[in-house]
Image (cartoon, coloured by chain):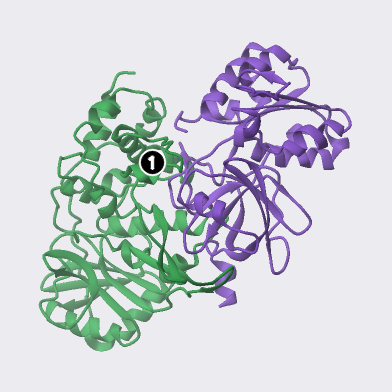
Chain colours: A purple, B green
Amino acid sequence: MAEAARVNPLVPQVGRITKIIDETPDVKTFHVTTETGKPFTPLPGQLAMLSLLDVGEAMFSITSQGPDHLELAIKKVGMLTDALHEAEPGQSVGIRGPYGNGFPLEMMRGKDLLFIGGGIGLAPVRSLINYCIEHRKDYGHLWIIYGARSPADLCFKDDLFNNWPKVENCRVDVTVDRGDDTWQGHEGFVPAFVEELNPAPEGKVAITCGPPIMIKFVLQSMEKLGFKDEQIVTTLEMRMKCGIGKCGRCNLGSCYVCLDGPVFTLAQLKKLPNEY
Amino acid sequence: MLKIGQDKLPELISAWAGGARVFVPQEREGTSIFTPWDGKGKLTLGQGNTLEPPKDLFFPRTEAMYRYQVNGPAATLETLPPLEEKRVLVGIRSCDARSLLIMDDVFLTRGYVDEFYRQRRENTRIVALACNEAQPACFCTAFGIDPGRAEGADVQMWPGEGGYLLEAITDAGKELLKQAGNLLEEAGNAHPPAAAAPGLQVDTGGVTEKLQRMFEHPYWTAVSRKCLGCGACTYLCPTCHCFDIQGENQGDSGYKFRCWDSCMFSEYTRMAGGHNPRPSKKERLRNRFLHKLQYFPERYGKFACVGCGRCLDRCPVNVDITRVIREVKEVTL
């Protein structure tokens, strides 16, 4: 039995949720561990297949990890995520992975990094931000530009306002589409905010993730600012079932996003069919 | 070269059935499929190819993978083992034999081996049957397949006068022929008959390269207009291998299984939240043809079509992959 469990990559490990953090009205971060500790050790940008055994299974980015747990920030959008949002600490889950290529750490080494996130799109990018903070000497200046619909919709507020601004050689700029009575920060959409902040492309790699419409306009802004396609990195989302390039559905041309992605440079994406 | 008379064929199947489950082409409720030989009825090894390909024997329609039991916040999980049954598949044609090599690429390479598929594949001996009668809808030679000699077979059979000629190809094949004992006779100087010329001819040369430049072409809107999205093509295709993972839940326990899925269905790519990268039949049909003729060749170095003709034969609206290949080659860019 144990032998078969080891060889069938589609069978999850049984884990449990140890902690749940309310990020926004519709996003929660779940800490997941197993009896034997951390389920696996992913690279930044890799994915995990998480399931509630009696509900269903879906692929999520891994937003961070600790010595004995993984963190997944999950927005409530469907049957499984609704059920996850009802769960309490101690809830059993199935978890398998890690899947995908992760961010190109070697290509980014020594460069200044510009992170541009929108809404829940900060979740996969955060794994890289935290990695760069842990390996601070290997990367240059870190600049995080992030936006959400409203102040309440900002994910990872503790990181945005407390932790990341204190990191050496790191800058954080936050915007919201529309503020409220107490909001004193910037108001406006992310792409316009990026243009306003006017980051210079020299020596930089830009990493962007957010809603498709935001990514579309951010890419136009980056082009205006003089960033080349090779300097822009994004991470894609697709429906997935197997995670290992066999079940078929997450293909972009002859690439499988679960295996060959989810991280692509814009130069790579432009060679693939525009079908995401 | 050995031979066997038609009348001795049931005895040969019985001899092999001693150590394995033997699957032969048979009619079941009006559909020709590969099923275990039950010793009844007429054993003909089929008139032409079976309606359903034998992929179900290696990649079943549904296959349970693990059971689970949820006890409040706790859960236990029990992995189900792959099938270990020994099998002999008799009467498979060259096209379907090639399809197994295509499935091998998917399930046995690129870092992950599918244990369920591997077990079934390794435990199945292949006895192929050459085609000596043309079928109206097949075109295997378009993909370099020899209808007279199957790739990957353990034993090759040819229809002969009043029976069949047989030749062992692999050691496992020699073992099978040895098991047959004196049912087989030396065929003397008999030669395999000439292979049938397939009913359809199409030249696939350059089609991959042409398709690489056709993703945005209006051709896909035109060709997909009549598609009903029924998925019959993917269901009958010997190389279509897309699957879903689903659960059957009763109270606190249940099991997870994988089952065939189809790129012709909108649910296939629809994400939670509603976004669908292939929202209409145009994108879905395009993906199916590009997968067969461009994406699979790019990834694995071979076409994911074997020219069996089942999809075009059974499509309710006559979407025809040979016609698509011809039209793609003629389209102006």
Q: Residue at x 16, y 40 (%)?
A: B318
Q: Which residue is mark 1?
A: B291
Front one among A265 and A224? A224
- Asked if residue B276 lies left or right of residue B96, the reply is right
Nearest the camera: A269 or B291? A269
Q: Position of residue A55 (x, y in %)?
A: 47, 59
Residue B184 appears in the rendering = no
Q: Amino acid at mark 1?
A: His
- Point out residue A220 in the picture as x, y percentages from the top left corner: 58, 16
- The residue furthest front is A181
Q: Quadrant of residue A95?
A: bottom right
- Rendered residue at 35%/34% (across/down): B279
- Residue B30: x and y, percent? 11, 65
Sort mark 1 into few (<14), some (14-19) or many (20+) by Cα contacts within 10 Å: many
Q: Quadrant location of the N terminus of chain B?
A: bottom left
Instruction: Locate residue B12: give its quadrant.
Output: bottom left
Is residue B156 visible in this depiction of the protein? yes
Residue B158 position within the rendered picture, expressed as x and y whole percent measured from the top left: 21, 66
